[in-house]
Amino acid sequence: MATESFHDMFTQDVLRKLFPGDRADRFFDALYGDTTEGAYDISLEFKGHSQNKLQFEFHLKQRPDKCLGCNLTYGLPQIFSRHPIININGLVQEIDNLLNGRARCTDWQLGMTQVVSSELHVIPLILFQDT
């Protein structure tokens, strides 16, 4: 499948349906029992395709009057990988369904947290696929 087709497939609307904005609140409610304790919003972004890999990123965007840098975002890949609200296995299955047989997701991997700025941290999500 051509890269342009993947960009056409993974629009902002599709990404928001795959990973709704309220998932961050549900995540913080599960962790802390209070959504207001959350220091960031979480969104899913599509970054591209190369060598049988689909590249996504979780964007952790600082909430107003919160400190993203004061939170422990470096351990999040391990937490995200198994947390039922983040549900990466379910997310990968939904993406696989969207591919509708044109490719098949065979595995996934989370990268280490990257600090883009004091207001944005990023966690790469790589989906490995057979075409």
Image (tube, rainbow, N blue to C red):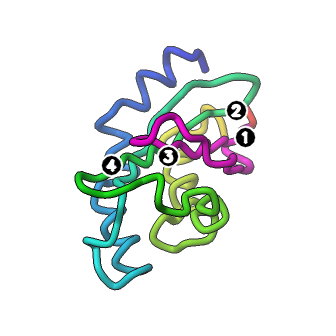
10 Å crowding of disc 3: few (<14), some (14-19), many (20+): many
What amino acid type should be assigned to the residue bearing mark 4? Lys
Identified at 37% across, 46% down, the residue is 61
Q: In the rendered structure, does residue 74 fall within the stretch colored magenta?
A: no
Q: Which labelled disc corresponds to residue 53? A: 2
Q: Earlier in the sequence, mark 4 or mark 2?
A: 4
Q: CA separation, marks 1 and 3?
A: 17 Å
Is disc 4 in contact with disc 1, using a CB cutoff of under 8 Å?
no
Mark 1 secondary-structure assignment: strand
Q: Which mark is residue 58?
A: 3
Mark 2 residue type: Lys
Disc 1 designates what residue? 128
As drawn, is 125 to the left or to the right of 51? left
Inspect the image, locate mark 1, and give the three-letter code of the amino acid beneath it: Phe
Secondary structure at numbered mark 4: helix
Q: Earlier in the sequence, mark 4 or mark 1?
A: 4
Q: Which residue is mark 4?
A: 17
Q: Earlier in the sequence, mark 1 or mark 3?
A: 3
SS for tag 3?
strand
The magenta region covers 105-129
Q: Are marks 1 and 2 in contact (CB under 8 Å)?
A: yes
Q: CA distance from mark 4 to mark 2?
A: 21 Å
Would you place residue 79 above or below residue 110 in this image? Answer: below
Q: Nearer the viewer, residue 77 or 116?
A: 116
Q: Which mark is residue 20?
A: none
Q: Residue at x 49, y 46 (%)?
A: 58
Q: Check disc 3 and give the amino acid type.
A: Phe
Tell whether 33 sits left or right of 110: left
Quarter of the picture containing the C terminus is top right
**Closer to the observer: label 3 or label 4?**
3
Q: Earlier in the sequence, mark 3 or mark 4?
A: 4
Of pointers 3 and 2, the one earlier in the residue sequence: 2
